[in-house]
Amino acid sequence: MKGHRWFAAVYDRMTAPAERGFMKDIRKELAGGASGRVLEIGAGTGANFAYYEDGLEVVATEPDPYMLRRAEARAAESKARIDLKQAPAAKLPVEDASFDTVVGTLVMCSVDDQAEALAEVRRVLKPTGEYRFFEHVRYENPIGGLSQTLIAPLWGWCGAGCHPNRKTVDSIRDAGFEVSRVEVTMPTPPIPPMLFTRPHALGFATPASG
């Protein structure tokens, strides 16, 4: 993958206010609560790595080589055992039903095909496994949703392929998951540019039986 050199270079500085604020608790809950053998998809610059429990075995994937380079430093500092691999969420280089937990934070907005990526998440999870996710999603309000659709081409160009208007929780259900818990919040101010990615969904899902 060619990657996004400039986006990777500014990403940590751009997200620093959120990381000092609401993202800290999100990462503590999702990554900090992960157990068993863990796979993290779309690890980015490795912001979750500090929150995994000591000694936890984590395979972390990230397709962008520039993001991956920054994640390597955080992997080295983590008390978990992080095995970094360059791979997109739609083509995970791991065996079927081999993970107890899959963690994804702000990933499904930028994958090329949500259905393919979520099919991979389901493939690699054990039947009793859990997908723990946090994603920004489409507004339920029609006007808000329309604003996200209108800004989507420009947003994607500026944000390394990010789509602000995806109905990600619906996509997770459509991919064969049972969503046991989901909380939709609006942790960012209602002003541009945060306005366009304001709704966020935190959730937990398991592979549906049958």
Image (cartoon, helix red, strand yellow):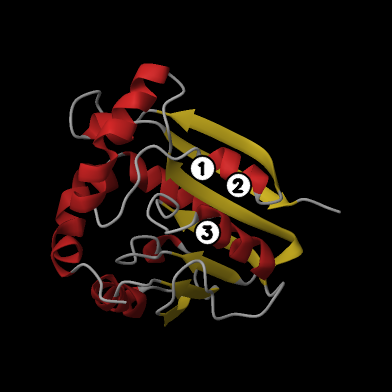
Q: Earlier in the sequence, mark 3 or mark 1?
A: 3
Q: Residue at x 40, y 51 (%)?
A: 106
* Image spot of residue 139 (x, y percent): 41, 26
| Secondary structure under the numbered disc 3 in the rendered image | strand
Q: Position of residue 34 (x, y in %)?
A: 57, 59
Q: Nearer the viewer, mark 2 or mark 3?
A: 2
Q: Which residue is mark 1?
A: 168
Q: Quadrant of the C terminus?
A: bottom right
Classed neighbour count for the residue bearing mark 3: other residues with Cα under 10 Å, few (<14), some (14–19), many (≥20): many
Tell me, for residue 172, which label it has, or none.
2
Closest to the camera, between mark 3 and mark 1, is 1
The residue drawn where x is 38% and y is 26% is 145
Going by the image, does 45 lie left or right of 52?
Answer: left
Q: Is residue 48 found left or right of 205 in the rendered image?
A: left
Q: Nearer the viewer, residue 29 or 110?
A: 110
Q: Are marks 2 and 3 in contact (CB under 8 Å)?
A: no
Q: Which residue is situated farthest in the right direction here?
A: 210
User: Mark 1: few, some, or many residues within 10 Å (few <14, many ≥20)?
Assistant: many
Please state the horizontal and vertical placement of residue 87, each as a whole percent of the image: 44, 76
Dot 2 lies on which element?
helix
Q: Is residue 188 visible?
A: no
**Which residue occupies 24% across, 34% down?**
194
Task: State the separation of the CA atoms marked 3 and 1.
Answer: 15 Å
Q: Is residue 125 positioned above or below 206 on the image?
A: below
Q: Secondary structure at mark 1?
A: helix
Mark 1 is on which residue type? Thr
